[in-house]
Amino acid sequence: MKLSAFGEKFAGDSGIVELMDDLSTALIENPDMIFMGGGNPGRLPEVEQVFKDCMETILEDSQQRHSLFGIYQSPQGEKEFRSEVAAYLNKQFGWNLSSRNIALSNGSQSAFFMLYNMLGGTMADGSKRSIHLPLSPEYLGYRDVGLSSPFFTATRPKIGHLDEHLFKYHIDFSNLQVDENTAAMCVSRPTNPTGNVLTDNEIELLDELAKARDIPLIIDGAYGLPFPSIIFTEVTPFWNDNTILVLSLSKLGLPGARTGIVVANEEIIQAFTRTNTVTSLACGTMGPAIAKQLFRSGQITSLSRDHILPFYRERSHQVVKWFGQNMGNLPYRIHKPEGAIFLWLWFEDLPISSQELYERLKKRGVLVVPGQNFFVGIEDEWAHKHQCIRVSYAQDEATVKRGVEIIAEEVRKAYE
Ligand SMILES: Cc1ncc(COP(=O)(O)O)c(C=O)c1O
């Protein structure tokens, strides 16, 4: 088969494809594998029940059933749902949105593909512009989405030590690599993989900088505000005309519904909708049909507040404790868990690479994600890139506890 440059790039080897293949093959070969690798949300029975009730309501009503199965919705997403989202955000946060500020996508991953390539890469005049990540390590799913390369630039974080085993990345504002070739800045808040949550002050500084450069600030709220709100610190949802806020229903517990929600000014939403029409024709209906009921009933807030947030907050504390008990005096560090569903572990001066540690853990039946893939946009060599792993704590308690024990055993062996 002869491939185009596009084909070579997207059908060829890439970090995320290799990783996802590796994870799924490992699971097929060993169904008992302790899965601490992917981004699947935890199973919360109370939340599943609400989704089930919503689906039953839809299925019992002939009109709603037809809307769900039988028609293409507008490429921007069903208007009633977009109005519902806008009304909710206005009421909660005093934003000034209408349905024209909202567009849907088939998962936020595909929204990022479109947004990034609409803004960055090769410009109409042939010049190149990049997407800047002010705090890398960042979400590895961004890594390969650019239609041209190099596509991302990033600023190395400052590392703050909070205690012997706890650290935190900070944006190095004095060294931010943003210039006239930057098309947009993007941050995930909370950050996947680290669980870092940018403070209101950091977001405001980024916003000022973006406005001064006349480029958008993209906030990836897949785990964040206002829903599913997996954030353990006190921070405020942020949006203005220069912000592109990208939300998702996945981490509420609906990754199968593939629903992303983009909140932006009308010019961006219009451009985004056209792009989405070309690539997807229309958006899936299941996510909006369920979520419409959650917005109306207010459960979009209460599900997060009463079930989702407490589950991850308590679990994160528990898992940090388990690591403490099992690691003993090993030189491990954990990024302060401030949100999302992962712990980010750093083993300074580890005699093996994080890739080797990942391989050894896989042989022991534990899947984690090696850290080097997350340093998107940081191309130069840096030992730190090979000393970290990402561990999901979303699975059931006994599984996660056993996983922590095995990780500690393998890390001990590696240091010995
Ligand atoms: C930070 C972040 N952004 C975006 C996505 C994409 O999610 P989805 O396409 O399911 O909305 C993920 C998925 O894990 C993520 O972790």
Image (spheres, helix red, strand yellow):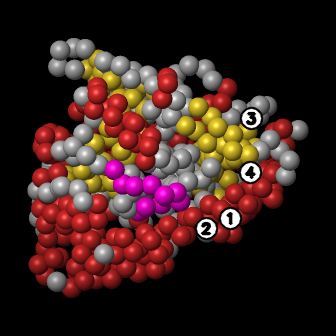
- The mark closer to the camera, 1 or 4, is 1
Q: Which mark is residue 348?
A: 3
Are circles 3 and 2 on residues that touch, CB within 8 Å? no
Q: CA distance from mark 1 to mark 3?
A: 23 Å
Q: Which residues make up the magenta segment?
A: 228-238
Badge 4 density bin: few <14, some 14–19, many ≥20, Cα 10 Å: many
Inspect the image, locate mark 1, and give the three-letter code of the amino acid beneath it.
Gln
Mark 1 vs 3, N-terminal side: 1
First in sequence: mark 3 vs mark 2: 2
The residue shown at (46%, 80%) is: 46
For disc 3, the neighbor class at 10 Å (few under 14, some 14 to 19, many from 20) is some
The overriding secondary structure of the stretch rendered in magenta is loop
**At numbered mark 4, what does the secondary structure look like: helix, strand or loop?**
helix
Residue placed most toward the observer, 353 or 236:
236
Q: CA distance from mark 3 to mark 2?
A: 27 Å
- Going by the numbered disc 4, the residue's amino acid type is Ile
| Callout 3: SS | loop
Neighbour class for label 2 at 10 Å: few (<14), some, many (≥20)?
A: few
Q: Amino acid at mark 2?
A: Glu
Earlier-in-chain disc, 4 versus 3: 3
Q: Earlier in the sequence, mark 1 or mark 4?
A: 1
1 and 2 marks in contact (CB < 8 Å) = yes
